[in-house]
Image (cartoon, helix red, strand yellow):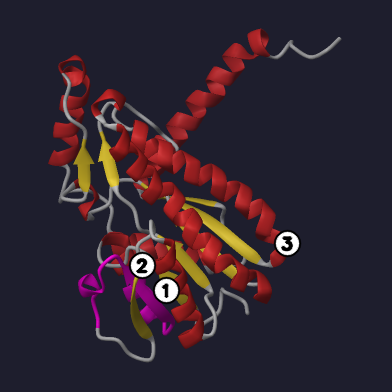
Amino acid sequence: MDTTGSDRVWLITGASSGFGRQFVAAALDAGDRVLSTARSVADLEGPESDRLLHAQLDVTDRDSIDSAVAYALDRFGRIDVLVNNAGVGLLGAFEEIDEPDFRHNLEVNFFGPLAVTRAVLPSMRARRSGHIVQMSSVIGVVPGPGGTAYAGGKFALEGFSEALAAEVRHLGIGVTIVEPGPFRTDASGRSMQWGTPLDDYATLIGPARTAFEATHGHQPGDPRRGVDAVIAAISSETPPLRLPLGSKSFEWIETYLQGRLDQARDVRPAGSDTDHR
């Protein structure tokens, strides 16, 4: 089935708030069918119907992943679009974040999407159809102080997803990496965790945290408009591999990539003349 058409079946993780909740609403508005998932079903919105089902799914629990995927396939017969949206925020200088918290961040933001993708991919491969949306972040392209854990997970997700896209393209399966900038979700509110402050990083991380928290509720991005842009992109004849989302995301990514290109040109004389002669 062409996943650009109508009556698509969606499996959406982290659907209790933010982008996830908006993906559910937009898919239903389009007449599609949705398995809406979250760690707690009680947090999911909307009464169940023939087009909307709820399921518990914890991306760090393989049994819950397999159960949710099996439920979607049993009730809807297929999964056309997987949205790996579930994630957690963790910022702070590297030394301010203890190892268990750092590892948990990677479990949710990197290994979680991998596990859900692994569970869904065989059914897409069998049908030679499907699309996987990986919700990354502008921080998955443009890292900065305080982003060692979060950027590390998103960079890993982006590398995995780009390689995966090359592997499954000939099977009729698409992959799109979405890179949102600041959007008006809870990502910079209650959902964001911070490391334990250390004096040596106070002048670097302290002001960054203050500025970050001050933007909460004032972010320029509209989540529903962002979701509509994603759906339009993956529904096009040539869905993009990467989709920066929001004006700030484009601005920051363009500046960052131009800087990397300039740096590569600067160091080319030192690093390029290393082949066997």
Which image quadrant is residue 249 in? top left
For the point 34% across and 28% down, the residue is: 144
For the point 73% across and 61% down, the residue is: 170
Q: Mark 1 points at which residue?
A: 68
Left-right relation of 24 to 275: left
For the point 34% across and 76% down, the residue is: 55
**Does 38 lie within the magenta span?**
yes
Which image quadrant is residue 89 in? top left
Q: What element carries label 2?
A: loop
Is residue 128 in sight in this rendering?
no
Q: Mark 2 points at which residue?
A: 57
Q: Is mark 3 on a helix, strand or loop?
A: helix
Is residue 257 in sight in this rendering?
yes
Q: Residue furthest front?
A: 63
Q: Residues within 10 Å of mark 1 (few under 14, many from 20)?
A: many
Q: Residues within 10 Å of mark 2 (few under 14, many from 20)?
A: many
51, 219: nearer the viewer? 51
**Type of amino acid at the residue the image marks with label 2:** Leu
Q: Where is 125 relative to 221, above or below?
A: below
Q: In terms of sequence position, does the residue under pointer 2 or pointer 3 come before the other?
A: 2
Q: Name the residue under label 3.
A: 170
- The spot of residue 155 in percent (x, y) is 47, 39
**Type of amino acid at the residue the image marks with label 1:** Ala
* CB-based contact (under 8 Å), mark 2 and mark 1: yes
Q: Where is 224 relative to 73, above or below?
A: above
Q: State which region is magenta.
A: 23-46
Q: How crowded is mark 3: few (under 14 residues within 10 Å), some or many (20 or more)?
A: few
